[in-house]
Image: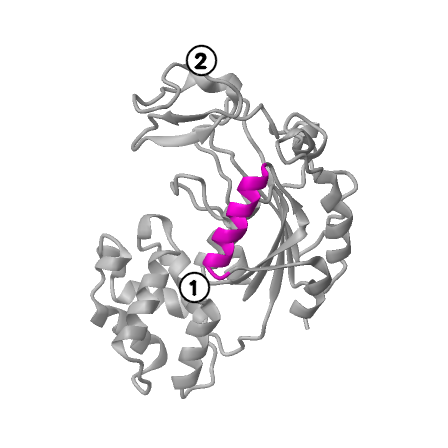
Amino acid sequence: MKLIDITKAFQNVRKDTEDINENDCLNAIQKLKLSNYKDIPSIPLNKVKELFVQLLGDGFHLDDTKFKEVQDFLSNCTLKKMVDERLLAKVLRYLLRKDSTKKVALLIVDVQNDFISGSLALKHSPACEDGVDVVPVINQMVQMKFHFFVYTMDWHPQDHISFITNVSRYDLHPTSKVPLAKDAKTFDLVTFAGDGDPFDQVLWPAHCIQGTEGAELHPELTEIKGDNSMRLLKGIDPKVDSYSAFWDNNHTHQTKLFSELIDRDITDIVVCGLATDICVKFTAIDGQKHGFNTTVVLDACRGVAHDGIEIARCEQQACGIRIIDSSEVSSLLA
């Protein structure tokens, strides 16, 4: 469900003209003691309705189906579907705002030295695509009138679980296709035992280590500075990888990206960068799941493997993500 669709549904039935602020939303959540429920799906539907009556008064009507859609959407916004009062207050303020003007963010994914000329340079991967090719395309796009710019960066500690050099540091699960750490090779898919459920992990060369030149943005990439821009560091936890800019791979940690976009009333995101079939793919899919109108600019991306690039394209289109050429970006901002 799209964020903008929920907002317009409430706009169509509201009779008041005042904006509702975040504190109003937080007070309503706390008054109804929603944090007493184990998670958002367990909140009775009548409580969800009561929440909106608290905020909007009782002079509006939405059917139960729409309230259930809103509850399901809120469930997917928070870690483990828990009642995160602060985040829910932010989301409710966003959904109930009066001004739903289109605002577009540009997400520039992992255009870092190691993926271009360093230890994990894409030009040496099976697709032989050169990551540096995205730089001039992205530099043209950042001159356009986006409302917000996000530069994501892998920012791994030395002992990160994705590094082939660290495979012996972490316990492999008995179901792993490579059962012994000594037999593991770069690019193998292994299964780690983890702290809870086992999970799969591709073993990469050490890359984008915190504080190193390889982790820095490419020097020719134009970085917008100021209040309308941010760097988002991901993959910081040594025990789990983070392909998406919204979540780590095991959904045990949520980054601040969703909250930042909500705070700025962003309705649409445009995703580009490296790599097409990994971090760009997972970031775009999560953005779509979170209700943003999501677009991928294909000629501003480069990937690892041709089959992976094609799979990414199919998966993205299947969930409603638009895939375009950079020549079409300006029309999104009109």
| Quadrant of the drawing holding the N terminus | bottom left
Q: Which residue is drawn at 58% across and 23% down?
A: 206
Classify residue 288 as left or right of residue 334: left
Task: Please report the bounds of the magenta region as a residue range.
Answer: 305-320
Q: Is mark 1 on a helix, strand or loop?
A: helix
Identity of the residue drawn at 44% across and 70% down: 95
Q: Which of 71 and 131 is in front in this view?
A: 131
Q: Which image quadrant is residue 27 in?
A: bottom left
| Residue 74 seen in the current view | yes
What type of secondary structure mainly makes up the magenta span? helix
Q: Does the magenta stretch include residue 16?
A: no
Say above or below: 174 vs 135: above
Q: Earlier in the sequence, mark 2 or mark 1?
A: 1
Q: Where is residue 173 in the image (x, y as percent from the top left)?
A: 32, 23
Residue 270: name its quadrant: bottom right
Q: Quadrant of the C terminus?
A: bottom right
Q: How crowded is mark 1: few (under 14 residues within 10 Å), some or many (20 or more)?
A: many
Rounded to the nearest whole Å, what is the CA distance between mark 2 and mark 1?
47 Å
Whether 311 is among the magenta residues is: yes
* Residue name at image x 51 percent, y 34 percent: 236
Q: Using a 10 Å C-alpha cutoff, classify the residue at mark 2 as few (fewer than 14 neighbours), some (14 to 19) or many (20 or more).
A: few
Question: In the figure, 191 relative to 24: above or below?
Answer: above
Residue 183's disc number: 2
Residue named by callout 1: 91
